Amino acid sequence: MNVSHQVLVSETEIFQRMAHLADEIVRAPVKPDMAAVVLVGGFVFAADLLRALARRGLDLPAEFFWLRSYAGAREGARDVSVMISPTARVRGHNVLLLDGILDRGRTLTKAVDLLRDQGALSVTSAVMVDRGRQDGEAHADYAAFTGLDGFLIGYGMDDAGHHRGLPYIARVD
């Protein structure tokens, strides 16, 4: 699938921002002791951020779960589907929730609810991109980038399964 796109955030900018984001998280008053990664869109961001945290002495075990809100479309559905739930491994942990993009906040809200239902002690969220919508249902505690608009691909974000592996973030023209 070949689409015309405009690069918004370069690979170098992403690498630099991951270092700053890891520094912020390490300095937080409540340090996470486990990561919970929302699949599929959050896996690239999570891998890079978890490595950046480990380089700073915060090596977190990871739990993975799968939520679906786009299902191949370019606009999120009202209802978030739970494909695979988080497990009780999060019970009693201060969880760092990681996801790729926060648009309206429905996926983030669902993820936080699921983690709390499994007994997470606390949940702090970090996303690669927070659109910063005023009408959003939720906002991330940490975001690598804010305010990027348009339909985004690359760095784990896709267009019907394509372009996840791009090392940068781009807007589809």
Image (cartoon, rainbow, N blue to C red):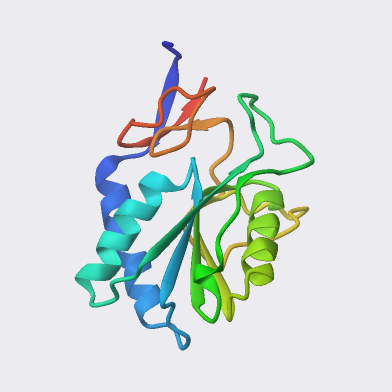
Q: How many numbered tags mark residues here?
A: 0
**Residue ranking furthest to the left:** 55
Is residue 161 in view?
yes
**On screen, residue 148 above or below 95:** above
Tell which of 36 and 5 is nearer to you: 36
Can the viewer see residue 17? no
Q: Quadrant of residue 122?
A: bottom right
Name the quadrant containing residue 48.
bottom left
Q: Is 85 on the left-hand or right-hand side of 117?
A: left
Residue 103 drawn above or below residue 7: below
x and y percent of residue 57 in the render?
23, 77
Q: Residue at x 50, y 79 (%)?
A: 93
- Residue 83 versus residue 109: which sits nearer the camera? 83
Residue 86: where, in percent of width, then height? 56, 58
Q: Quadrant for the N terminus, please.
A: top left
Taking the image as shown, residue 19 lies to the left or right of residue 122, namely left
Residue 144: image x %, image y %? 43, 57
Please say if 74 is above or below 136. Answer: above
